[in-house]
Amino acid sequence: MGSVDPDAVLGQELRAARLAAGLTVEAAAWRAGLSPTRLAGVEGGDGLILVADLVPLVRAYGTTMARLGARYEAALDRAEGRTR
């Protein structure tokens, strides 16, 4: 199995949460105080995101850091072929 990029996995989970909330990149970025380009880059795994940026995003998505963290861990486990 190849190496897994944790940033890409987090980006995929953020995108899934945004879509589940019914938000466009532009609307989510506006609500979180980020630029749409920055958010799109993070969702694409092309950029690091600070916890300070995650908090307003998860609020905009109607979820919590704990839920996002659990989704991220599960997705990372799947990508790495691990089971818990």
Image (spheres, rainbow, N blue to C red):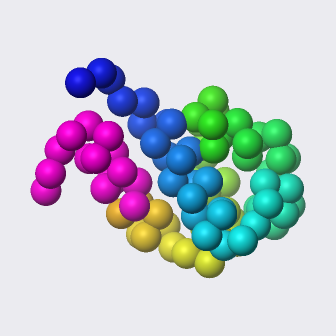
* Residue at image point 36% right, 63% down: 70
Place residue 48 in its image quadrant.
Answer: top right
Give the camera-side residue of 37 and 81.
Answer: 81
Q: Is residue 80 magenta?
A: yes
Residue 78 location, x and y as percent?
A: 28, 47
Extreme-bottom residue of the structure: 62
Residue 59 seen in this snapshot: no
Left or right, 5 with reference to 2 = right
- Residue located at (63% from left, 44% from top): 43
Q: Quadrant of the C terminus?
A: bottom left
Can see residue 5? Answer: yes
Specify the segment rendered in magenta.
Answer: 71-84
Q: Residue 41: which quarter of the image?
A: top right
Q: Residue at x 50, y 36 (%)?
A: 7
Q: Position of residue 54 (x, y in %)?
A: 61, 57
Magenta segment's dominant SS is helix
The quarter of the displayed image where residue 81 is located: top left
Residue 43 versus residue 4 in the image, above or below: below
Query: What residue occupies the far left of the structure in this picture?
Result: 84
